[in-house]
Image: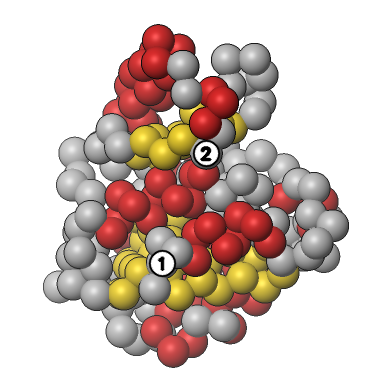
């Protein structure tokens, strides 16, 4: 069990000390991954930004993720039984519009951090289906990082195996066979607000050394 996201992030940071002082780019998946990303970026003396992806929901159950989409428009479909084109096209278009609004909210007037040629650590608070992380890793890989690392405190074993194929390295503290949901491994697992995300990004931006 982790006390909360900050506890989990500190434990993850201890496993990533090889990248300390190498100016890693920490890309957090909003919203839950962002407070964790702030801890990693601060501890490893790196840079923080977000990588924007959104789950694609089942037409039968909005809470069930059938895949994910990134802000470039690339999508990953985990459940082939849901690949009905008219629904998916509407779902993709809706989620892509949300991602563009979120980028404008989180980083107004700023370009995305460029992962090209850098050590990149993509962090989230856990992996359930893994679809969101796969989309995030794909989006970053397309921009040619030197090394691409997936970092999560806890994951479903099958999902961890899936994301390992898309990263150069996967750092995961727990992959229990009895996994049911990410939140079951946190004593405190409240929702993270947009305001918290913006505050985390601003703190790291102002703390970064001048280039």
Q: Residues within 10 Å of mark 1 (few under 14, many from 20)?
A: many
Visual colour scheme: secondary structure
Residue 78 — which label? 2
Marker count (numbered) = 2
* Residue 168 on image: x %, y %: 39, 73
Taking the image as shown, residue 54 lies to the left or right of residue 183, namely: left
**Label 2 residue SS:** loop
Establish if 200 lies above or below 39: above
- Which badge, 1 or 2, is on the more N-terminal residue? 2
In which quadrant of the rendered image does the N terminus lie?
A: bottom right
Residue at x 28%, y 33% (from the top left corner): 73
* Residue 158 on image: x %, y %: 65, 57
Residue 142 location, quadrant: bottom left
In which quadrant of the rendered image does the C terminus lie?
A: bottom left
Give the CA distance from mark 1 to mark 2: 17 Å
**Label 1 residue SS:** loop
* Residue 99 on image: x %, y %: 36, 31
Taking the image as shown, residue 33 lies to the left or right of residue 49, namely: right
Taking the image as shown, residue 157 lies to the left or right of residue 197, namely: right
Q: Which numbered mark, 1 or 2, is in the foreground of this view? A: 2
Residue at x 37%, y 36% (from the top left corner): 75
Residue 67 seen in render: no
Q: Looking at the image, which residue sits at the far bottom?
A: 18
Taking the image as shown, residue 64 lies to the left or right of residue 209, namely: right
Residue 125 location, quadrant: bottom right
Establish if 2 lies above or below 13: above
* Residue 47 on image: x %, y %: 33, 67
Residue underneath mark 1: 167
Depth check: 27 or 148 in front? 148
Establish if 112 lies above or below 45: above
């Amino acid at each position: 069990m982790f006390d909360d996201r900050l506890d989990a992030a500190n434990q993850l940071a201890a496993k990533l000390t090889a990248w300390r002082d190498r100016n890693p780019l920490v890309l957090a998946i909003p919203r839950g991954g962002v407070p964790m990303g702030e801890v990693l970026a601060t501890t490893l003396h790196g840079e923080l930004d977000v990588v924007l992806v959104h789950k694609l929901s089942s037409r039968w159950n909005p809470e069930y993720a059938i895949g994910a989409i990134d802000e470039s428009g690339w999508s990953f479909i985990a459940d082939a039984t849901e690949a009905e084109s008219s629904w998916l096209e509407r779902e993709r278009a809706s989620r892509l519009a949300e991602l563009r609004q979120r980028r404008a909210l989180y980083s107004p007037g700023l370009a995305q951090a460029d992962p090209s040629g850098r050590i990149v650590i993509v962090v989230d608070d856990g992996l359930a289906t893994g679809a969101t992380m796969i989309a995030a890793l794909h989006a970053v890989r397309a921009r040619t990082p030197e090394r691409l690392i997936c970092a999560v405190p806890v994951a479903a074993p099958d999902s961890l195996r899936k994301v390992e194929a898309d990263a150069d390295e996967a750092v995961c503290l727990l992959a229990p066979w009895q996994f049911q949901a990410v939140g079951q491994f946190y004593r405190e697992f409240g929702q993270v607000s947009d305001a918290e995300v913006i505050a985390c990004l601003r703190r790291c931006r102002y703390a970064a050394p001048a280039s």
